[in-house]
Amino acid sequence: YPLDWAPRAMAVDLEVVEEIDSAARARAVVDRLALAGVDVVKLASMDVSYNERALPVMPIETFRAAVDAAHAHRLRVFVHAHTADGYQKALDGGADVIAHSSFEPLSDAVIAEVARRQIPVIPTLWVFAAFGHARHHPEYLEELRPQLLPGWFARLADFDRRMRAAGDTLPDDFLPDLRFSRLDNAMQAARDNLARLAAAGARFAFGTDTSF
């Protein structure tokens, strides 16, 4: 799983994320998670980070081993994908659900296959679009005050202040080097992909992505 989105201490030490580097480890991790009683297995399929850095790509054999192990335990596999390659790997690997929108244009073939298989896509556009919205609508922060504990609101207000002072680059404690200009382009590509998926008859599901 690419760890550019979270500090390693939180992702690994708290066992939020398992890194797998072989088919054997993929099966072992999934078996352990199944015994622990998880509801689903989520795999990341990202060849490029949010800020356009190249990431190590999970071999398709490792990916399929994880999917096969999950299915052997009658668990569905959600694939975290934000790129055209990620969507393709989700299809090639036998994923049950695709979580997130692609920030790159999807091919007509991928659009058609997602729709044909009726693989649910969870767009989660607001996770990223919210930053742009907050940047252009300062009043949005105050609208959130009644919904948050005072400490959390103070942290969010501090982030908002630093975000506005940072220019085109978001504060490093979110995703290092992520630019608003990149975010705007990514959101437009995601909306275009979703419109094409909808026109092709694809299925959609909805979630906030905030439970993590």
Image (cartoon, rainbow, N blue to C red):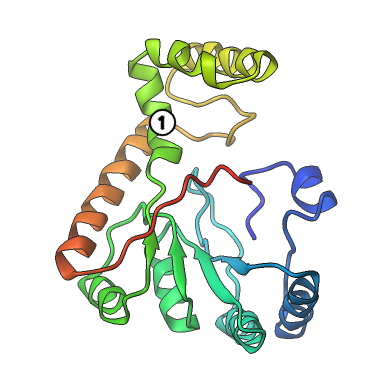
Residue 79 sits above or below residue 155 on the image: below
User: Residue 121 placed where, x, y %?
Assistant: 37, 63
Count of picture labels:
1
Q: Quadrant of the N terminus?
A: bottom right
Amino acid identity at mark 1? Ala
Q: Residue at x 28, y 64 (%)?
A: 106
Q: Which residue reaches farthest front?
A: 146
Residue 194 sits above or below residue 188 on the image: below
Q: Quadrant of residue 73?
A: bottom right
Q: Residue at x 17, y 69 (%)?
A: 200
Q: Quadrant of residue 134?
A: top left
Q: Quadrant of residue 9?
A: top right
User: Residue 19 placed where, x, y %?
Assistant: 73, 65
The crowd level at tag 1 (other Cα within 10 Å; few <14, some 14-19, many 20+) is: few
Position of 118 compared to 23: left or right?
A: left
Q: Residue at x 44, y 32 (%)?
A: 179
The residue beneath circle 1 is: 130
Q: Nearer the viewer, residue 36 or 8?
A: 36
Q: Is residue 9 visible?
A: yes
Q: Is residue 138 visible?
A: no
User: Residue 205 placed where, x, y %?
Assistant: 38, 59
* SS class, disc 1: helix
